[in-house]
Image (cartoon, helix red, strand yellow):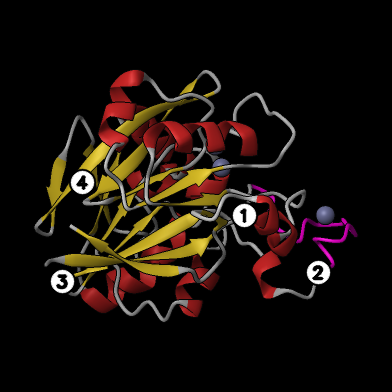
């Protein structure tokens, strides 16, 4: 059966864990599972590597994952913790002598054009700019032979996209999921989803809300991501249902397509 390998490159919230200047038990934990870089996953299949989001930690994450080539980037939305590593794709442009296609909703692509204006402007001769090609996501599309289904959700008042790939889905930075998107999230083996902390947040799902969504959609397994320092790895896992676990940097599993 065709499959892909999903690797969690980063499982942390926008500030990362440890959080700068914080001395709480989780930030000072010696358990490597409590060290969370900014949220991103890697999809590897058929010799291709696709990342979802390029975080401010992208360079470090790519080194840690021994990422020797990069074939495409999918963007969930335009927040800084999801896009600011885009400049660091340049070594792949040089090595592969090619542009890297970038996929996102039109509002996300507009943010990229603004945040990274220098990419689209006439630059200094000889300076190395990221070589990207923007693709507007308007519905399901094929990428290197597999079907990618965008999952629209809301992140407070802002739209965000999750992605379904075969029997897995990745949905970060959401506070509500419309019924039409829930229909796209049924029959999952693995669901990687936002669960920031226990305390409610205006733009993120918390543990209670994400558990309710899991109860409704019934994936075989669920993995919480975009986790802040309120949630210690061992302590939180001990309280979660058996099929729900905190994701962690480096978590990997195979996904049936
Ligand atoms: Zn985020
Ligand atoms: Zn802390
Ligand atoms: Zn966000």
Residue 129 location in percent, x, y? 37, 60
Q: Which sits earlier in the primary sequence, circle 4 or circle 3? A: 3
Could you give the CA–CA distance between mark 1 and mark 3, rounded to whole angstroms? 28 Å
Residue topped by disc 4: 148
Compared to 89, does 152 lie above or below? Answer: above
Q: Which sits earlier in the primary sequence, circle 2 or circle 4? A: 2
Residue 178 location in percent, x, y? 38, 20
Residue 229 location in percent, x, y? 75, 52
Quick one: SS at disc 1?
loop
- Return the mark for residue 46: 3
User: Which of labels 1 and 2 is toward the front?
Assistant: 2
Quarter the N terminus occupies: bottom left
Q: Quadrant of residue 29?
A: bottom right
Residue shown at 38% from the left, 35% from the top: 217
State which region is magenta: 14-28
Residue topped by disc 2: 29
Quick check: can you spot residue 127? no
- Return the mark for residue 21: none
Q: Are marks 4 and 1 in contact (CB under 8 Å)?
A: no
């Amino acid at each position: 059966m065709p499959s892909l390998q999903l690797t969690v490159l980063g499982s942390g919230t926008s500030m990362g864990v440890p959080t700068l200047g914080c001395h709480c038990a989780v930030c000072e934990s010696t358990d490597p599972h409590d060290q969370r870089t900014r949220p991103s996953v890697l999809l590897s299949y058929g010799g291709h590597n696709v990342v979802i989001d390029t975080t401010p930690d992208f360079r470090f994450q790519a080194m840690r994952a021994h990422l020797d080539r990069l074939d495409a980037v999918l963007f969930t939305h335009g927040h800084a913790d999801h896009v600011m590593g885009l400049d660091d794709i340049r070594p792949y442009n040089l090595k592969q002598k090619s542009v890297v296609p970038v996929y996102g909703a039109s509002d996300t692509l507009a943010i990229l054009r603004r945040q990274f204006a220098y990419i689209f402007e006439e630059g200094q001769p000889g300076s190395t700019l990221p070589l990207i090609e923007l693709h507007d996501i308007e519905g399901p599309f094929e990428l290197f032979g597999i079907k990618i289904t965008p999952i629209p959700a809301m992140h407070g008042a802002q739209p965000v996209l999750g992605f379904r790939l075969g029997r897995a889905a990745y949905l970060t930075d959401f506070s509500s999921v419309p019924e039409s998107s829930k229909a796209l999230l049924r029959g999952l083996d693995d669901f990687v989803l936002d669960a920031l902390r226990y305390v409610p947040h205006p733009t993120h799902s918390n543990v209670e809300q994400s558990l309710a969504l899991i109860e409704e959609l019934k994936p075989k397994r669920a993995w919480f991501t975009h986790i802040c320092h309120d949630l210690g790895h061992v302590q939180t896992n001990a309280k979660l249902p058996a099929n729900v676990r905190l994701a962690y940097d480096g978590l990997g599993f195979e996904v049936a397509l």
